Amino acid sequence: MHPDALPPPVFRYDGSGHLCKLGLIYIASSIVMDAEWSAMAAPGVSVHTTRIKLPKVTVEGIEEMMNSPELAQAARLVGSAPIDLMCFGGTSASFLHGTAYDHALIAKMQQWVPGVRVNTASTATLAALKEVRAGKVALASPYVDAVHAKAIRFLEENGHQVVQHANLRIDEDRALAEVPLEKVYDLVRSVDHPEASAIFISCTNFRSVGAIEALEQALGKPVISAVQASFWHCLETLQVAGARPGYGQLFAKRLARAADSTGR
């Protein structure tokens, strides 16, 4: 057959970030956040990750990570790619010393990578809670008590009284990701409270997004996770409709239109 008589080629979607390219600074031993972002991302949204080491999921271990020169290096590495937004994907690390600390972290990231928009898991969480008009909340986390207490303080200093909470007291990062989704579902249901207008699931190495729709159906209220909120806030900041359906009412305004096999 003459080449000119061949039908036009059919291209498959290849992961191209033609809608937006998201840069993620994430924990080296963690496996949940970038995987869940990719699960929620519609064709056209790509995720590009760089990593930093976390010695232990304790206040001391988190502080050691945040004071390491690796953090600036990680930001500059992922920021050297043509990304549209850079997210720091550590919830406890960004709320460790309160709201001012989180704002200072964003300012440092903007200095390290000028011209790239920046967010953190904690900033995104507050924006997501505002989006669903949350007031009082319930909190579920896998943290040790000291880190869990800082999560409560962060929420409450930002106007979200925590009326019920529970934590699993896990101090090893790899163990966080090993909690089965069924146990996460049960933990979140256990913290529900009549006065809680929403439930927040903290930690970006703690599986959550696969259970959010089922939890919202069971509880009749918004369920926000740190991973889900971070991804949503990236899309919201960039004004991109790039989420797949099925990951919570938070994405109501950010759902992608149906795409063909090429993702365009």
Image (tube, helix red, strand yellow):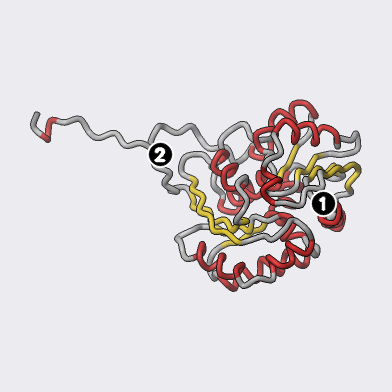
- Quarter of the figure that contains the C terminus: top left
| 140 relative to 56, above or below | above
The residue lying at 73 percent from left, 62 percent from top is: 62
The residue lying at 9 percent from left, 28 percent from top is: 1
Query: Which of these two is toward me, 42 or 207?
Result: 207
> Which residue has dot 1 on it?
144
Mark 2 element type: loop
Query: Of the numbered discs in the image, which one, if any, rests on residue 44?
Result: none
Residue projecting furthest to the left: 2
Residue 182 appears at what percent x and percent y?
72, 30
Residue 154 appears at what percent x and percent y?
82, 57
Amino acid type indicated by mark 2: Arg
Amino acid type indicated by mark 1: Val
Residue 208 falls left or right of residue 197:
left
Mark 1 element type: loop
Indicate which label's residue lies in the foreground, 2 or 1: 1
| 217 relative to 113, above or below | above
